[in-house]
């Protein structure tokens, strides 16, 4: 169980800090929820305490892991992806759902490269935005920097 003040990652949403643990009634059922504040857009997310482990909630990564993510983003190594956009979409979505930061960084890098070659579909653009936000939110907490600084750091790694 996590506590108020813990910095955690909620897969598919990103990282944030637990600002409260509250009991809420939703659809007639009373459950405890972590109230998590994300650094991006000061968004608040409710995470059911009883499902936290099941959905992959974890403590934020360490500095070395984040440095490895930046190395992945700056690597010029080509990663093969399916050519068909529908398969590519599912392939990338599965990588994001894994919660593995290196996999998510691969998604960002590949879709950014693809976007430079041709415009991304709406679905792929949404996946790219979500993947970037997941990395940015966690990196902002790990490095204790503003979202804008982390965004620049990531852009420099990808496009530098």
Image (tube, rainbow, N blue to C red):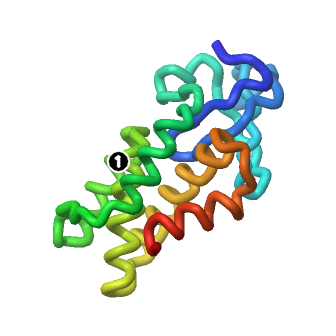
Quarter occupied by residue 133: bottom right
Q: In the structure shown, which secondary structural element does the residue marked by tag 1 occupy?
A: helix
Quarter occupied by residue 124: bottom left
Picture mark count = 1
The structure residue drawn at horizontal position 72% and vertical position 26%, both measured from the top left corner, is 34
* x and y, in percent, of residue 64 in the image: 49, 36
Q: From what the image shows, is residue 65 above or below residue 91?
A: above
Q: From what the image shows, is residue 41 above or below residue 20?
A: below
Q: From what the image shows, is residue 81 above or below residue 33?
A: below
Q: Using the image as rendered, state which of residue 69 and residue 91 is in the foreground.
A: 69
* x and y, in percent, of residue 144 in the image: 72, 43
* x and y, in percent, of residue 14 in the image: 58, 45
Residue that extends furthest to the bottom in the rendered view of this protein: 118
The structure residue drawn at horizontal position 70% and vertical position 57%, both measured from the top left corner, is 147
The structure residue drawn at horizontal position 18% and vertical position 71%, both measured from the top left corner, is 84
Q: Quadrant of the N terminus?
A: top right
Q: From what the image shows, is residue 131 above or below residue 63?
A: below
- Does residue 106 appear in this view? yes
Residue behind mark 1? 103
Quarter occupied by residue 77: bottom left
The structure residue drawn at horizontal position 26% and vertical position 55%, both measured from the top left corner, is 91
* x and y, in percent, of residue 37 in the image: 76, 41
Q: Using the image as rendered, state which of residue 28 and residue 61 is in the foreground.
A: 61
Q: Using the image as rendered, state which of residue 79 and residue 128 is in the foreground.
A: 79
Residue that extends furthest to the top in the rendered view of this protein: 1
- Does residue 28 appear in this view? no
Q: Using the image as rendered, state which of residue 64 and residue 137 is in the foreground.
A: 64
Q: Give the class, few, some or many, for how many residues have Cα within 10 Å of label 1's Cα (few <14, many ≥20).
A: some
């Amino acid at each position: 169980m996590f506590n108020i003040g813990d910095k955690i990652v909620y897969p598919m949403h990103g990282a944030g800090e637990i600002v409260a643990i509250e009991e809420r009634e939703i659809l007639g059922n009373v459950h405890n929820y972590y109230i998590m504040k994300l650094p991006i857009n000061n968004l608040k997310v409710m995470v059911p305490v009883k499902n936290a482990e099941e959905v992959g909630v974890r403590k934020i990564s360490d500095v070395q892991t984040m440095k490895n993510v930046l190395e992945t983003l700056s690597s010029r190594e080509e990663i093969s992806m399916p050519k068909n956009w529908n398969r590519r979409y599912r392939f990338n979505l599965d990588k994001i759902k894994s919660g593995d930061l290196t996999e998510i960084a691969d998604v960002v890098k590949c879709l950014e490269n693809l976007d430079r070659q041709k415009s991304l579909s709406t679905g792929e653009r949404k996946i790219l935005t979500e993947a970037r936000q997941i990395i940015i939110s966690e990196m902002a907490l790990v490095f204790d920097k503003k979202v804008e600084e982390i965004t620049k750091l990531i852009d420099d790694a990808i496009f530098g």
